[in-house]
Amino acid sequence: MNKYFPGIGRIEYRPDAGPDDTLVFRHYNPSETVHGRTMEEWMKFSVCYFNTFRYLGSDDYYGERTHQRSWEDASRSLDNYKRRMLANFEFLQKLNVKYYSLSDRWQRKKMAPEGESFDETNGYLDEMVTLAADLQKQTGIKPLYYSADLFSHPRYMNGAGSNPDATCSRTPAPRSSAAWTPPSA
């Protein structure tokens, strides 16, 4: 994968790197043993999907987006969400990071766009979960955690699973289940 970060190879351990050498690990050697375990076992790095790939540097009160990314067109299209996920996995591979964290649709629709209906929304989420699961199988990269957004939509103003509104309280279980189970599984 070298589509979204061209010219940048895998980041390697180089203890002899000088101050002008960039994009190297000077101190982190994943295979070095420390107190009976490798550094990779001690330090399970992860990349937060929202902060790294979804957040565009904008603020609701102070201005427009400041981050310009080659894969990002700032739309809420499913294709844009797919490009973000592909860029995420390319980035993780280049850093040799084995984990990432994300939520399904929290904070400006993190993993999948909101559709016109509940079914369309879940269809988008199904497509994105399938894409993420396929990329995880190809790369061995896994989610460190995955959370279902059961708080930001107005339907959850009185809670999610404990909401007295039956139409609201029935949505968390499928959402939480969808978070971990690709539709094809």
Image (cartoon, rainbow, N blue to C red):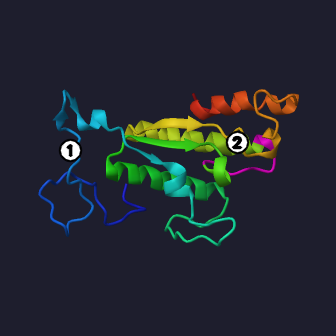
Q: Is residue 144 visible?
A: yes
Instruction: Say above or below: 11 vs 72.
Output: above
Task: Report the side of 105 relative to 22 (left or right).
Answer: right
Task: Report the side of 154 relative to 146 (left or right).
Answer: right
Residue depth check, mark 2 versus mark 1: number of the one nearer the observer? 1
What is the quadrant of the N terminus in the image?
bottom left
Residue located 49% across and 68% down the image: 70
Helix, strand, or loop for circle 2? helix
x and y percentages locating residue 29 in the rendered image? 20, 44
Residue located 61% across and 34% down the image: 179
Q: Is residue 83 visible?
A: no
Residue at label 1? 29
x and y percentages locating residue 65 in the rendered image? 60, 70
User: In the rendering, which numbered label is found on residue 72?
Assistant: none
Task: Report the side of 43 relative to 147 (left or right).
Answer: left
Amino acid type of the residue tagged 2 in the rendering: Gly
Residue located 49% across and 39% down the image: 134
Residue at label 2? 123
Quarter of the image for residue 36 reads top left
The region drawn magenta spans 111-119
Amino acid type of the residue tagged 1 in the rendering: Asn
